[in-house]
Amino acid sequence: MKDIEIGPIRPPSESESLLIRVTRGCHWNKCYFCGLYKSMKFSMRPLEETITDIKRQAELYQGKKFKSCFLQDGDALVLKSDYLHRILEALNKYFPDLEYITSYARADSITRKSLAELKELRQSGLNHLYCGMETGSDTILQLINKGFNADTVVKSGCMAKEAGMILSEFILLGIGGKELSDENAIQTASALNIIQPDFIRVHATGIKSESKMGELVREGSFILQSEEEIVIEQKLFLQHLHEMDSFYMNEHIINLLLEVRGNLRTEKQEMLSVIDRFLTLPPDEKLLFIIGRRLNVFFLLDDLEKPEQHRKAEECLRKILSKNPDVDFSALCNYVRQSLI
Ligand code: SF4
């Protein structure tokens, strides 16, 4: 796509979407766990340049009916509403079939706008926000240097919902480490019970060694959880979430139990049953599943019943143990997870 600028990231659920880059990088860029835009200096793209990209993409994809457009990069809501309206106007003109215009949005960028402004943006077509709240715990938000507190998370989520937008909240399981695991589960559920977002998208934390969180791991002030402990945290989190009209999703390959997804009002018990099915496996089968999942031998718990995949996972585990009988599986699995982001 010559001369059209595309950013590096989009949510997994936007894989079929038209991508329009409105900013480069993240204006905050200081979360201790995040390396997504570390090497990129933040800038807002000049309006005319962005509109030219919209026209060029319309020429390039002539006839293709996009249902959704995602505004890149890290937080389009940081832009002034006038700027966003001009972008939305051009998108509606050149891509009249769009049903959804979506963006990442930081909680504090949402609360910096008024409810009336959010409603106007919604009316102009910006109708789905992806918010990385990560956790509902103030202690953890501070630990990861998120730059806003839980009150702002709740206020921003409620404002987006009141403006009539679809709201997805991203949650990081394991971001409190061993020490703050229960707090992460309980405080995050309690914030979400107030917000009642349309989608709760959970991701298991993968800590990169070059990040600030990686330093905390090396110093010993942040203790990584095992895969099983992260699942136990997920169980506590789900137990504390109300039965509400939110869709709960494990959608990223980084998550161990991809089958835990469903409507919280009608499928919460089924989701908890899947978690219990994993937690009650005999210890050797549990470890085998963890290793098999992390090495892409297994995708779902049912794969444990498939003899060929079972044998392959046993072989992988044997090789790991023969190289290092004292292997630290928590560190090994974190290493695999962080390589997926
Ligand atoms: S997590 Fe989001 S807000 Fe934080 S630095 Fe990364 S892109 Fe920016």
Image: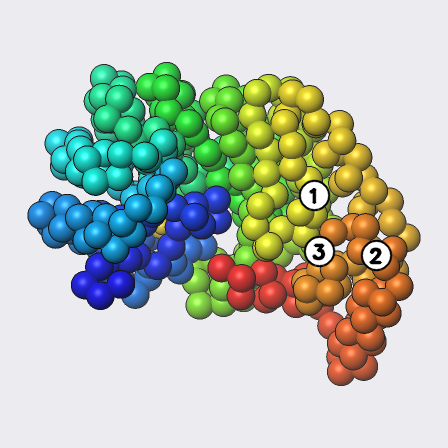
Question: Is disc 2 in contact with disc 1, using a CB cutoff of under 8 Å?
Answer: no
Q: CA distance from mark 2 to mark 3?
A: 9 Å
Q: In the structure shown, which secondary structural element does the residue marked by tag 1 occupy?
A: loop
x, y percentage for residue 179?
62, 46
* 192 left or right, relative to 31: right
Say which element carries label 2.
Answer: helix
Q: Quadrant of the N terminus?
A: bottom left
Cα separation between marks 2 and 1:
14 Å
Q: Which residue is mark 3?
A: 299
How crowded pointer 3 is (Cα within 10 Å; few <14, some 14-19, many 20+) is rated as: some
Q: Residue at x 22, y 21 (%)?
A: 120
Amino acid at dot 1: Glu
* Disc ID at residue 304: 2
Residue visible at 71% across and 56% down? 299
Q: Please, what secondary structure does the residue beneath circle 3 have? A: loop
Of all residues shown, which one is farthest toward the front?
Answer: 63
State the residue in front, 152 or 262: 262
Q: Quadrant of residue 133?
A: top left
Which residue lies under the disc numbered 1?
259
Q: Residue at x 30, y 57 (%)?
A: 7
Q: Nearer the viewer, residue 83 or 338?
A: 83
User: How is colour applied across the structure in the image?
Assistant: rainbow
Where is residue 52? Give x, y as percent.
13, 50
Mark 1 and ligand 1: say if the CB distance to the nearest ligand atom is below 8 Å.
no
- Quadrant of the rendered structure where residue 247 is? top right
Residue 292: which quarter of the image?
A: bottom right
Residue type indicated by callout 3? Phe
Q: Residues within 10 Å of mark 1 (few under 14, many from 20)?
A: some
